[in-house]
Image (tube, rainbow, N blue to C red):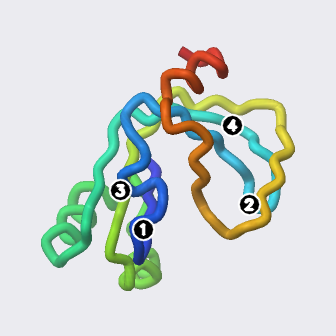
Amino acid sequence: MESRFSTRKFAPYNRVDKGDVVLLKQSSGPIVGLCQVNYVWFYQLDPASWQTIKEDFATAICAQDPDFWKEREAATFATLMRIQHVKPIEPIKFVKRDRRGWVVLHESSSQLQLDLGIL
């Protein structure tokens, strides 16, 4: 399970869908893996949705530590993704000079899936 919390509607919020391929990049490093999104939930956070996320997803997103929630308490949007087919790959250099946690490479996932040959 992958989770992203933000104060604005940044990707992957409403930009990722079931079947999309996600490239996994080390912070300040190369792309080292890929996976496929199996299911996705989007939340505009309010007290009820915070409670739902904590009750239904805390274990899956490894968020049992109270500091996890404290660090995200200013968030107003959340994206939760169940992932599958996680696969390590030979490192690929990718120059990215901004602080975005997510970059959308293709709007259409079907082409990317075919190009990577993972399906």
Q: Would residue 57 appear left or right of 48 to someone viewing this image?
A: right
Which comes sooner in the sequence, label 1 or label 4?
Answer: 1
Mark 4, Cα crowd under 10 Å, few <14 / some 14-19 / many 20+, is some
Q: Secondary structure at mark 4?
A: strand
Q: Residue at x 47, y 33 (%)?
A: 20
Q: CA distance from mark 2 to mark 4?
A: 13 Å
In this view of the protein, which residue sits in the foreground, 59 or 86? 86
Residue 41: x percent and y percent? Answer: 29, 50
Q: Would residue 88 appear left or right of 90 to someone viewing this image?
A: left
Q: Are marks 4 and 3 in contact (CB under 8 Å)?
A: no
In this view of the protein, which residue sits in the foreground, 109 or 39? 109
Which comes sooner in the sequence, label 2 or label 3?
Answer: 2
Which comes sooner in the sequence, label 3 or label 1?
Answer: 1
Q: Residue at x 71, y 49 (%)?
A: 25
Q: CA distance from mark 2 to mark 1?
A: 17 Å
Dot label at residue 27: 2
Q: Are marks 2 and 1 in contact (CB under 8 Å)?
A: no
Q: Secondary structure at mark 1?
A: strand
Kind of residue indicated by mark 1: Phe
Residue 68: x percent and y percent? Answer: 45, 75
Residue 3: x percent and y percent? Answer: 43, 57
Kind of residue indicated by mark 3: Thr
* Residue position marked by numbered label 1 in the rendering: 5
* Residue position marked by numbered label 3 in the rendering: 59
Mark 2, Cα crowd under 10 Å, few <14 / some 14-19 / many 20+, is few
The image quadrant of residue 86 is: top right
Height in image: 111 above or below 41? above
Q: Residue at x 63, y 35 (%)?
A: 34
* Residue position marked by numbered label 4 in the rendering: 33
